[in-house]
Image: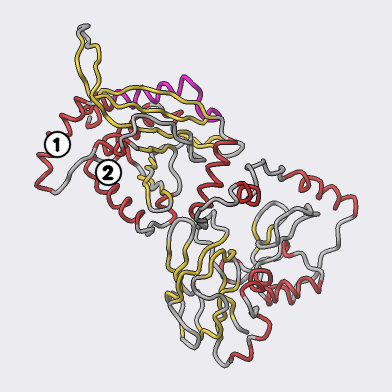
Amino acid sequence: MPIEILMPALSPTMEEGTLAKWLVKEGDTVSSGDLIAEIETDKATMEFEAVDEGVVGKIVIAEGSEGVAVNTVIAVLLEDGESADDIGSSAPAAPAAAAAEAAPVAVEAAAPAAAPAPAAATATDGTRIFASPLARRIAADKGLDLATLTGSGPRGRIVKADVEGATAAPAPAPAAAAAAAAPAKTAAPAAAPTGPSTEAVVKMYDGRDYEEVTLDGMRKTIAARLSEAKQTIPHFYLRRDIKLDALLKFRSQLNKQLDARGVKLSVNDFIIKAVANALQAVPEANAVWAGDRVLQMKASDVAVAVAIEGGLFTPVLQDADMKSLSALSGEMKDLASRARDRKLAPHEYQGGSFAISNLGMFGIDNFDAIVNPPHAGILAVGAGVKKPVVGEDGELTVATVMSVTMSVDHRVIDGAVGANLLAAIVENLENPLTMLA
């Protein structure tokens, strides 16, 4: 029978995407592993490979379509001996129908009336279930619970063969069903107010001249996640001034020696190394929040915010404590370049336990950054500026001083631990030679 090609989930958090470009057309023959489309997520444009072979019988979702839900049928593949007439009702005739018909049905015990539309099937324990529309219809006719079946299709998807020979299990007793339903009714708290409605704001500016800018996937994601982070993470802030003169002198000497290799170290490279080493020196701060527990990390995986058009990425430098300054510099330049082209793979911008956001190059003296969950903290870095300071001998002198603010998730890091971590960062930057020891 015709094979449905579904909108893939290209990252763990992806719920919808833009079908940017088709690399095949109806009538083309494709094999497993062939590139068939380019998909835009909220973070990157990624190539999508076929997992089956056959002939493209129908393209359901046109290229350029935005907001295509994961598991929506985007095309139909015909096997040997099949024709377009065999597609029948297996592929919806319009994108709107595809979104509603193709996505697996949610399998939940007495789900609340306000639950989202069934775009992704889930078992009662929250595990997502993937099932083809035909398998779903057969299961419904036979009274089968999809959560009790094992799928034999791609990525464990439940297909026709899995449900045809299955027998429905006895329905749970009313009391048991009610008991199972009770947790579901209280599982999702009501959404917190997010400010005036769109209609209210538009009405407020009625008669004024403005241009309406539609939010793309990245901006929607940034707005949602940072709002959630600021509302749910108990932030506290630690501030320090760092004298940079020794680092600037050391950096100049190193860059002269590295010039023949085409390596030029930035102050940011030293900051990355300083944070990575500090996380090793204060291991209890090298941790992430995991809902009902804390995961204390072994390696120092440091995320660094990179501004791009329309948003930002936080590529992660893994094992930063184990890498040389020149290696970190080269890796950071590569990640930043590909981030601006939206060519990073999900594993390159997910993870890490701590982040750095540097606005010093924009002339910002100091600022407070928002913790990016599940990280335990983020270091906001300002510009290095000449300031009068009191020297160790009590004399007034001038030094290059950089102001930093560390935002901390109090659920993971307490005040004293955060202070120790920031002190270690300061020590590394004011005595840069120690980072090479």
Q: Quadrant of the C terminus?
A: top left
Q: Which badge, 1 or 2, is on the more N-terminal residue?
A: 1
* Residue farthest along the right direction in this orientation: 174
Q: Which residue is labeled 1 in the image?
A: 254
Does residue 182 sit above or below 432 in this rendering?
below
Q: Quadrant of residue 423?
A: top left
Magenta-colored segment: predominant secondary structure: helix
Q: Are marks 1 and 2 in contact (CB under 8 Å)?
A: no
Residue 61 appears at what percent x and percent y?
56, 75
Relative placement, left or right, of 361 versus 165 is left
The residue at 63%/42% (across/down) is 195
> Residue 104 location, x and y as percent?
67, 66
Q: Is residue 415 magenta?
A: yes
Q: Give how far across and how far down residue 289 sits, in percent.
A: 54, 37
- Pointer 2: residues within 10 angstroms few (<14), some, or many (20+)? many
Which residue sits furthest top? 394
- The mark found on residue 328 in the picture is 2
Callout 1 amino acid: Leu
What residue is at 34 percent from the left and 29 percent from the top? 365
In the structure shown, which secondary structural element does the residue marked by tag 1 occupy?
A: helix
* Mark 1 Cα shell of 10 Å, populated few (<14), some (14-19), many (≥20): some
Residue type at mark 2 is Leu
Q: Residue at x 45, y 80 (%)?
A: 24
Question: Which mark identifies residue 45?
Answer: none
396 on left or right of 307: left
Q: In the rendered view, would you say 43 is above or below 258?
A: below
